[in-house]
């Protein structure tokens, strides 16, 4: 059986994206481990580290993501993923 974690993560982000659009939310803030931040950035999610890492059950750093920038980056680098992300918002 393959690891379902990436699909769970993407589904969560898709639901967050839909909720954000419906509620007029433009920025996401998150405390993330460096490995998660790298994974999301590789997938096209435009998070920027905005502060130093600190120990919170392991090292995490604060990140911010501008949804307009995220949309543009995903559209350019991974249009299929952006289309899937928009699937809920357009239904």
Image (cartoon, rainbow, N blue to C red):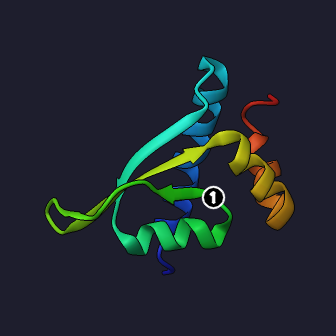
Question: Please, is residue 21 above or below residue 78 in the view?
Answer: above
Query: x and y percent of residue 45 in the render?
Result: 63, 58
Q: Could one spot residue 25 in this view of the protein?
A: yes
- In this rendered view, identify the residue nearer to me: 74 or 13: 74
Q: Residue furthest bottom?
A: 1
Judge left or right: residue 45 versus residue 29.
right
- In this rendered view, identify the residue nearer to me: 60 or 7: 60
Classed neighbour count for the residue bearing mark 1: other residues with Cα under 10 Å, few (<14), some (14–19), many (≥20):
many
Residue 35, located in which quarter of the rendered image?
A: bottom left
Question: Please, is residue 25 above or below residue 57 in the view?
Answer: above
Q: Residue at x 75, y 47 (%)?
A: 71
Q: Residue at x 80, y 50 (%)?
A: 72
Residue 77, located in which quarter of the rendered image?
A: bottom right
Query: x and y percent of residue 20 in the render?
Result: 59, 29
The residue that mark 1 highlights is 45
Q: Residue at x 59, y 67 (%)?
A: 41
Judge left or right: residue 62 versus residue 15.
left
Q: Could one spot residue 4 in this view of the protein?
A: no
Judge left or right: residue 6 versus residue 18.
left
């Amino acid at each position: 059986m393959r690891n379902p974690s990436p699909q769970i993560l993407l589904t969560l982000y898709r639901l967050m994206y839909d909720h954000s659009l419906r509620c007029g939310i433009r920025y996401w803030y998150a405390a993330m481990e460096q490995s998660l931040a790298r994974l999301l950035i590789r997938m096209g999610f435009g998070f920027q580290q905005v502060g130093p890492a600190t120990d919170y059950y392991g090292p995490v750093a604060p990140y911010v993501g501008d949804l307009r920038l995220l949309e543009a980056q995903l559209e350019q680098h991974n249009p299929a993923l952006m289309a899937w992300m928009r699937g809920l918002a357009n239904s």
